[in-house]
Amino acid sequence: MKKSAKNIMIQGTSSHVGKTVLVAAFCRIFKNRGLRVAPFKAQNMALNSSVTGDGGEIGRAQALQAEAAGITPTVDLNPILLKPSGDSLSQIIIHGKVFGVMSAREYHGFKKEAMGFVLESYQRLANAYDIIVIEGAGSPAEVNLRENDIANMGVAAATKSPVLLAGDIDRGGVFASIVGTMELLTEKEKDMVKGFIINKFRGDIGLLAPGLEFLAARTGRPVLGVVPYASDIILPDEDSVSLEDHVNGKGRGDKNKIKIAVIRLPRISNFTDFDALRCDPAVELKFIEDPDAVHGFDMIIIPGTKNTIEDLLWMKARGFDNALKSFHESKKGAIAGICGGFQMLGRVIKDPFGVESDKGLSEGLSFLDTETTLKRSKDTFRVTAEVSGPGNALYKVDGYEIHMGETMGKVTPFSKITRRGGRPAGLTEGGVSKDGSVWGTYIHGVFDNDSFREALIKDLLERKGIKENSFKKPYKDVKEASLARISRLVEESLRMDEILGIMGLC
């Protein structure tokens, strides 16, 4: 295939080894060297997504990597996005738009056709950039998925990309995982692997030397660097595996902080909405699965979900409906809903087309006097809105919508959308209860907006008799500092000259 850009691909021995952050770091390293660089992930399976300027939906991780590269996100950065909607079904998004819903078996048969969409996007990037940093998905050693692979070695072969294999030493078993991965690759696949990266290392690197020597001797390939574990990095997580570190616990701890709980739904999506809260020093954030844990928090958030009705039924089966009612009646905190969480706060959710279930209608939590009707089509827009916050002050917020429902009702709107999809708008959305203690919105990323978030936190603190809000740094500056820090750490830890040679850059 025609191509002009140089490339490198980061694959991993498994999910959650740090591929996303490594790719972001590589993008920033090359950008700092004056090169035009773009990230690329052919196939991403994730419920954390973002919206491009033209309304296309891509993985949230690729939006972050684009930020690291200093470019505007486009659908070509992630041509295929899989969003699981059930135990064996996924919504297939191609070039930013819904293509259909397929079972795992159906999609496996579709992958040969899907590769055409992947290479179409890759070629556009190759014509526009000097460097493409490609991210793999899962592990290349999943031999049952080798045929027509469009995530790992299939992409490396089609784009003639050298591969660096990353392993996570923090979770243990890194030597076995690297050697085992190499053993399960074909000879042609092994030839594409040019070296290894050991990620998330803690301790004395001198004690690691025998292991590094073993890997080089056993595989015939070098360890190109060991990246230290960085606990001070605040960047969005791609998948729900990372939530395990934040789940459960009650609203305890520092009495001078506000305690916010996010209900961890089975099909939770866009949980990166809460990263700005998680890194705020005035906030203690927890994800909870136990309804008995709600008391003691100052705010409970119902997040977005890929299947609102099924997750609503899960909440009721767990007893969250009664727990939230008790929490609301205690008048000791606020309740908020984002996207699907906002839909749940209403009286009813109608599904006339069987978009999510065959039930047709499900009763909501009835905190807001609204009705939601699920549609066949999905709304995906970048938006700018005005929100009436604490003290009736107006706050400008930027974010994005990703939903398949329309919500109507007799409630005070949460916001007025002034721009939608790059065009002027005069729409209202969301809803607020009469007493102001319950609110919901379709706008993802609302907490990323500093003025709104700080006003919300200040109001919650003052309700507890605490006057001071210690968070002063804009969230975008927190992310930028983390991108700068991790890129420096990766560059200092890896043999970059050798990697540049592997890429044919020197």
Image: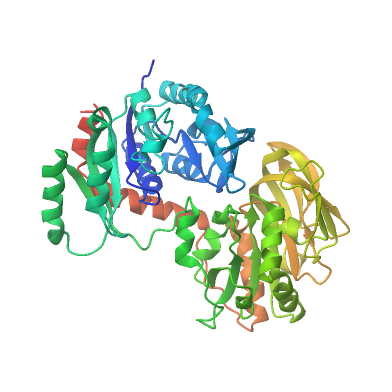
Report whether 51 appears left or right of 393. Answer: left
Can you name the residue that lies furthest to the top here? 2
Image position, residue 179 (x, y; %): 22, 45
Image position, residue 161 (x, y; %): 32, 28
Q: Colour scheme used in the picture?
A: rainbow
Image position, residue 11 (x, y; %): 34, 40
Query: Which image quadrant: the C terminus?
Result: top left
The residue at 73%/48% (across/down) is 357
Up/down of 15 relative to 395, above or below? above
Image position, residue 53 (x, y; %): 61, 36
Q: Nearer the viewer, residue 353 or 73?
A: 353
Quarter residue 152 falls in: top left
Can you name the residue that lies furthest to the right here? 410
Q: Nearer the viewer, residue 19 or 12?
A: 12
Query: Which image quadrant: the N terminus?
Result: top left
Report whether 195 appears left or right of 87. Answer: left
Report whether 450 appears left or right of 406. Answer: left
Up/down of 347 relative to 138, above or below? below
The answer to whether one can see residue 338 in this image is no
Quarter residue 98 falls in: top right
The residue at 81%/66% (across/down) is 433
The answer to whether one can see residue 308 in this image is yes
Quarter residue 355 falls in: top right
Q: Nearer the viewer, residue 110 or 136?
A: 110
The residue at 41%/23% (across/down) is 126
Up/down of 466 relative to 215, above or below? below
